Amino acid sequence: MPHWTEPARELPVLARCDVLVVGGGSAGAAAAIAAARSGARTLLVEQQGFLGGTSTGALVAPMMANHLQKQPLNQGIYLEVLEQLLATGDADIYKDGNAGWFNPEMLKITLESLAVEAGVDIWFHTWLADALVRDGVLRGAIVETKAGRGVIEASCCIDASGDADLAFRAGVPMVVGRADDGQNQPMALRFNLGHVDLQRAMQYFAELGEFEWTDSSRNPDIPLWTTACTWDKSWPLSPVFAQAVANGDLSEDDAAYFQIFTLPGRPGEVAFNCPRLDGITDALDPHERNKVQLQGKQRILKLWRFCRRYLPGFEHSYIAQIAPMIGVRESRRIVGEYVLTSDDFFAARKFEDAIARNNYPIDIHARDKKGGLHFMAQGDYHEIPFRCLVPLQVENLLVAGRCLSADFAAQGAVRIIPNCYAMGQAAGVAAALATQQALSPRALPPALLRQHLNWMNGEEPCL
Ligand SMILES: Cc1cc2nc3c(=O)[nH]c(=O)nc-3n(C[C@H](O)[C@H](O)[C@H](O)COP(=O)(O)OP(=O)(O)OC[C@H]3O[C@@H](n4cnc5c(N)ncnc54)[C@H](O)[C@@H]3O)c2cc1C
């Protein structure tokens, strides 16, 4: 391949901080808030102009239930955020006890307010370009902004980029996709329809059968309901989709995965967990990302027309929003001090250095036999050890969120938003402690970390 050699150049040091967080999604926002509250001078760089990442920018709502006896398994900043949203009617509690039904726009503002209040220095529209590693120790990052390229020096960095961009560039060992064939889960481009007659739509789904909802006291005009349709089993909507395929209004692919939710704080709006782009899986390939944008919008158009024509209540709907970020279920995963496995999941394994708890099922989107939901024994949970956030080979770096150290199946369970908050919070506290004690996070005694993560010990306040 023809190539150019990039000339060496001196870069300005734009800032120095104790903790640098790359990526402001669920994990990154929680990490930055926790680090700043723990006394660290914290700087967060984010390529978009908002916090929340996939949860806000890819329109991924609701936060999945991760509960035992209707009580959330994780607490801390995740619950604090939900409490703020509940107070304004921008979150709501489903009948299973999950308060994670939320309004993505208000989540952006809530996270931003909490981060600013904690003293986080947020740099939006800033892109991580490279890692600065000397003798196996990460010293900071090179970033790109509209003003050009520069350096941020940090005592400790947290990679919460979802794709482990910083860890990858720092030389941390990585794995991608399924162990046998490297295949990733499919990407998605989510969207919302506005001006839906929710009552009429609900009545229609109720008439179709097997349909439940939760009436809301916060949003009396927005009952919480969800419905879905896939080809692998029979749903109340299956005959409707079959008819649309027979009429040539949808292809089998368009209808392979359909799921919708109402949204607290957004009357008349419905969120679509689709189109799922089954053949487009490699989020690290820029051409595949383009395909999500181009094919995704065409599929959205078809789904919208289908809804208007076939679903009562949707006749006058319009496309209210197409997600600014593509939906990536998984891409790179770091190899850390511990690799969480599906065996840990099914054995409901607990760890001395646990920083999060999960019983959400292994959720693999794939149309071959390896796809589907796989549940653990009822009434139990497994834990995520801190070592899953500690990468091999590079010091002064932690990794939080969906790119943690886990096998493909275990990642398919723990990648949900509540766990990303818990991982981020633990990484933020650990990075601040490591900085204060002049240790690499790898050397932090688990007991000390747990002492500072007091929600894990059932203590108040949550941080
Ligand atoms: C289609 C889909 C449906 C899902 N459904 C659900 C659901 O219903 N409920 C649920 O709980 N979970 C769901 N999930 C999973 C969940 O949304 C994600 O796993 C979780 O939000 C990931 O959080 P994160 O903080 O690890 O990463 P992200 O939220 O992706 O955050 C990463 C952040 O880093 C930024 N970034 C990336 N690279 C750079 C860079 N080089 N420089 C600067 N910034 C950068 C990004 O802009 C982003 O803000 C779904 C995921 C998808 C894709």
Image (tube, rainbow, N blue to C red):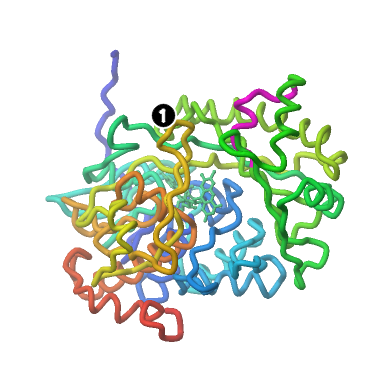
Quadrant in which the C terminus appears:
bottom left
Q: Where is residue 366 in the image (x, y as percent from the top left)?
A: 46, 35
Q: In screen coordinates, is 342 left or right of 287?
A: left
Residue 323 lies in the magenta-colored region = no
Q: Name the residue under label 1.
A: 285
Q: Which type of secondary structure does the marked residue at label 1 adopt? A: loop
Query: Given the image, on which type of amino acid does mark 1 rest?
Result: Asp
Closer-to-camera residue (236/24): 236
In this rendering, the count of numbered labels is 1
Closer-to-camera residue (25/389): 389
| Residue drawn 77% across the image and 21% down it | 247
Q: In screen coordinates, is 42 left or right of 234?
A: left
Q: Where is residue 217 in the image (x, y as percent from the top left)?
A: 77, 73
Q: Quadrant of residue 108?
A: bottom right
Q: In which quarter of the image is residue 107?
A: bottom right
Quadrant in which the N terminus appears:
top left
* Whether residue 121 can be seen here: no
Mark 1 Cβ and ligand 1 under 8 Å apart: no
Magenta residues span 249-258
| Residue drawn 33% across the image and 69% down it | 355
Q: Position of residue 186 (x, y in %)?
A: 48, 35
Mark 1, other Cα within 10 Å: few <14 / some 14–19 / many ≥20:
few
Task: Please identify the residue farthest to the left as the structure is shown.
Answer: 135
Q: In this view, does 396 lie above or below 3?
A: below
Q: Position of residue 63 (x, y in %)?
A: 55, 59
